[in-house]
């Protein structure tokens, strides 16, 4: 076996390439020390509970991230399957009036608080127009989605897809879970199987 001089580890660390996680691969000695620390039995119940809590928290973070990324293994049953993935992509690729609902509601509230009769009437008009636009948008979404589902998934049941698409469309895009995988106006893939 050869021995390293004091300057060699610094050079080796500078040359070491990350293993895909943004850090160099640990040496055997470091890996064994880390494994020994993980395997060490807790001294008391309090420490055991703390370790269990940390392990559950880490597992929860991994599952949440996988759900956000759309990993099929971790999705809820309502989100699984190629048809549901298509519905999500279909809703996410189109512009919806719901994207503008927060600014429209803020304008409506400001006009309503003004105290002037004309502005309060304008406020109620903006509110009613917003609700009407959302309803029309959802009806259009339903018919276009159903037409695409019949074309892409001819032999399957479409039960629940309208409700699923409507609930997703009523959420702001940044709040949707799983996160949107397509951009506005993006062409959808021809098959989802």
Image (tube, rainbow, N blue to C red):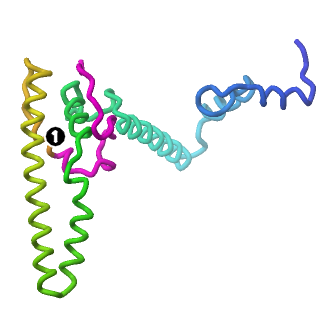
> Image quadrant of residue 153?
top left
Q: As rendered, which of 111 and 2 lies closer to the eye?
A: 111
What is the magenta range? 167-193
Q: Is residue 85 above or below residue 140?
A: above
**Seen in the image, is 30 located left or right of residue 121?**
right
Which quadrant is home to the C terminus? top left
By secondary structure, the bulk of the magenta-drawn segment is best described as loop
Q: Is residue 111 above or below residue 60?
A: below
Picture residue at 61% right of the left edge, 43% below the top: 43
Neighbour tally class for label 1: few under 14, some 14-19, many 20 plus, Cα within 10 Å: many
Picture residue at 12% right of the left edge, 34% below the top: 145
- Reply yes or no: does residue 29 show up in magenta: no
- Reply yes or no: does residue 182 show up in magenta: yes
Picture residue at 12% right of the left edge, 83% below the top: 118
> Image quadrant of residue 29?
top right
| Residue that mark 1 sits on | 165
Residue 53: give x, y in percent of width and height.
47, 45
């Amino acid at each position: 076996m050869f021995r390293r001089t004091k300057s060699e580890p610094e050079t080796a660390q500078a040359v070491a390439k990350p293993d895909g996680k943004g850090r160099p691969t640990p040496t055997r000695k470091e890996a064994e020390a880390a494994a020994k620390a993980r395997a060490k039995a807790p001294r008391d119940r309090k420490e055991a509970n703390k370790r269990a809590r940390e392990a559950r928290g880490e597992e929860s973070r991994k599952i949440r991230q996988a759900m956000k990324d759309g990993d099929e293994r971790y999705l809820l049953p309502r989100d699984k399957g190629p048809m549901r993935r298509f519905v999500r992509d279909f809703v996410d690729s189109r512009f919806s009036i719901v994207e503008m609902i927060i600014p429209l509601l803020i304008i409506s509230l400001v006009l309503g608080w003004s105290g002037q009769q004309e502005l309060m009437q304008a406020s109620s008009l903006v509110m009613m127009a917003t609700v009407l636009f959302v309803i029309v948008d959802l009806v259009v979404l339903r018919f276009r989605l159903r037409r695409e589902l019949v074309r892409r998934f001819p032999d399957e049941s479409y039960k629940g897809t309208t409700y699923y698409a409507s609930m997703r469309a009523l959420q702001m895009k940044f709040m949707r879970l799983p996160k949107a995988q397509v951009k506005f106006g993006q062409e959808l893939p021809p098959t989802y199987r």
